[in-house]
Image (cartoon, rainbow, N blue to C red):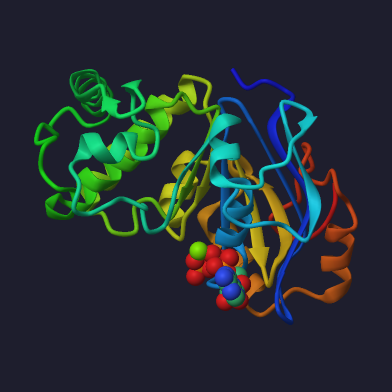
Amino acid sequence: MTNTEPVVEMKNISVTFGGLIALNRVSISVRRGEVLGLIGHNGAGKSTLIRVLSGAQRADSGQIFIDSAETALTNPADAKHNGIETVYQTLALAGNLDSVSNLFLGRELRRARFFRRERQMRQAAQQVIERINPRFTNLQTPVEDLSGGQRQSVAIARAVHFQAKVIVLDEPTAALGPAETAHFNDLIARLKSENVGIVLVSHDIEQIMELADRLVVMADGKVISRVDAGEASKEQILSLLILGESSAPDKLLQAEAADPAADRGAVASPGSPASKT
Ligand SMILES: Nc1ncnc2c1ncn2[C@@H]1O[C@H](COP(=O)(O)OP(=O)(O)OP(=O)(O)O)[C@@H](O)[C@H]1O
Ligand SMILES: [Mg+2]
């Protein structure tokens, strides 16, 4: 069941890099048990938006609400404390360390200041990784020697172990083969049924169609469309992306940007991408 109140809401987030406007008053929200698909061409601002959510990038302006309370996420630890776990495009794993160390990187279980609880960490890692990928048993192998799918499992296991309310995934299957991608898709469906909110950035339209409940389409740092995934065909979603590339009319973009709560249940018809209903 999807709760009605968003677990995370980002309102009017803007980020500039020097003269470049990477995000221009972008608003999104995600509820528990819901997958929000974030799509758009290269450079649209997808990664920047989720970096703000994961505390890795400061916004110039805008607000973030977690369970309806305005919350400052000034660094990645803040985001983690607030139940937001991110699996980055780059996975952010330490290649020379094994899976157990990666799972607990920076959050090691300690008895006293300098004594890590090795056995406890190994058991916990084994449990969570088994759940995510039952065929993955070589926990002592440095992650740089693992397959793409196994590395992905470690990155997601980290989010699951720390009981995220929201898991943010940036191009999670870009480096995976078809079998690993299918397994990943099953995992997302399972996490969703466990009431985790998921923000999924993907260029894989099939995957987005399979997993997302709602889609937010971005172009040039703005939201150009919001679509209920069940109501759009693959062709319609592709046409939204193409429209994004050739950049939507300014008037429509401004209308979208002006509505801070646009993400709350507002569904644009796929045929008229930036229209309001
Ligand atoms: N640290 C940075 N410094 C300067 N410019 C940046 C930085 N990070 C992102 N940008 C710029 O901000 C814009 C948005 O980039 P972002 O990476 O968020 O796009 P994206 O939608 O994730 O693209 P992709 O699909 O290629 O991953 C781009 O023009 C990018 O070059
Ligand atoms: Mg990106």
Quarter location, residue 210: top left
Q: Residue at x 47, y 55 (%)?
A: 202
Residue 269: give x, y in percent of width and height: 74, 51
Residue 20: give x, y in percent of width and height: 70, 79
Quarter location, residue 229: top right
Quadrant of the rendering where the N terminus is positioned: top right
Q: Which residue lies furthest to the front in this view?
A: 113
Q: Compare residues 110 and 220 and report the one nearer the observer.
A: 110
Residue 185 falls left or right of residue 244: left
Residue 34: give x, y in percent of width and height: 57, 31
Q: Residue at x 71, y 51 (%)?
A: 226
Q: Residue at x 31, y 36 (%)?
A: 103
Q: Compare residues 171 and 126 and report the one nearer the observer.
A: 126
- Residue 242 appears in view: no
- Residue 50 appears in view: yes
How many marks the image carries: the answer is 0
Q: Is residue 57 above or below residue 117?
A: below
Residue 122: give x, y in percent of width and height: 19, 24
Q: Is residue 170 above or below residue 70?
A: below
Residue 206 falls left or right of residue 49: left
Q: Is residue 169 above or below residue 129?
A: below
